[in-house]
Image (cartoon, rainbow, N blue to C red):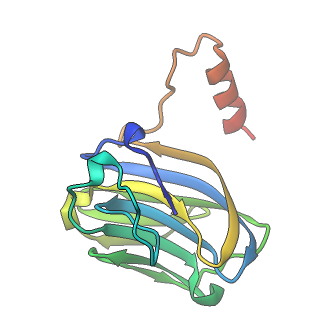
Amino acid sequence: MSVVADEFWEDDWDEYTFEVRGSKISGAEGFLIMFRCQGLMQARGQALEDHPPRMEKLKPSLEYWWNLGGWGNSRSQVESWGGKGGANSAHTIKDKDWYNIKIVNTPDSYTVILNDEEVATVDDDTENGVGRIGLATWSTVAKYDDVVVYGPDGPSLPVDAKSKLATTWAHLKSVK
């Protein structure tokens, strides 16, 4: 499990879209797409030796994860510790295929989208929708690419266009 670091996340962000592409290489399960994560994030069955400074005084974990191809790759569902799960579906994950995964988070709900198909919207105002994003696997080897997080106004370029390298690269990546 890997959750976005302090320097790249504001703890009060409650309205964002999280997009990522994933491909399962091998294993019994699919993907774990983390969102609304806050508190003492710990690997399953292990306590962290040293929590990051901003997390030392936080309450126990609140975590959400969209378990795509879970339960031996037999179904998918949003699971949660301390929040409201749901979004049950029959989606499974095939080895070597690429999947476009999207979570739209608001203070009052979250929507999960797989390959441009809305799977479910769940009404949930737990902690007003705040919390970090991350990626994980369970009994699976997978790779992730094209991770993008943006606010309600949509994605924006981090630099002034004017043919700068970062902008040119972003344009090339967006048209592939």
Question: Residue 22 at x, y = what percent?
Answer: 66, 60
Which residue corresponds to the image point at 46% horizontal and 45% vertical from the top-left?
149
| Among the 4 quarters of the image, the one containing residue 127 | bottom left
Q: Residue furthest right?
A: 96
Question: Residue 12 at x, y = what percent?
Answer: 24, 46
Which residue corresponds to the image point at 34% horizontal and 60% vertical from the top-left?
36
Q: Residue furthest top?
A: 162
Can residue 8 be seen by looking at this rendering? Answer: yes
User: How many numbered marks are there?
Assistant: 0
Which residue corresponds to the image point at 46% horizontal and 75% vertical from the top-left?
44
Up-down relation of residue 151 to residue 157 (above or below): below
User: Looking at the rendering, in which quadrant would you find the C terminus?
Assistant: top right
Up-down relation of residue 102 to residue 12 (above or below): below
Which residue corresponds to the image point at 20% horizontal and 56% vertical from the top-left?
57
| Among the 4 quarters of the image, the one containing residue 29 | bottom right
Q: Nearer the viewer, residue 121 or 146?
A: 146
Q: Nearer the viewer, residue 26 or 87?
A: 26
Q: Nearer the viewer, residue 53 or 152?
A: 53
Question: Residue 112 at x, y = what percent?
Answer: 46, 66
Question: Is 13 left or right of 150, judged from the image as shown?
Answer: left
Up-down relation of residue 5 to residue 95 (above or below): above
Can residue 14 be seen by looking at this rendering? Answer: no
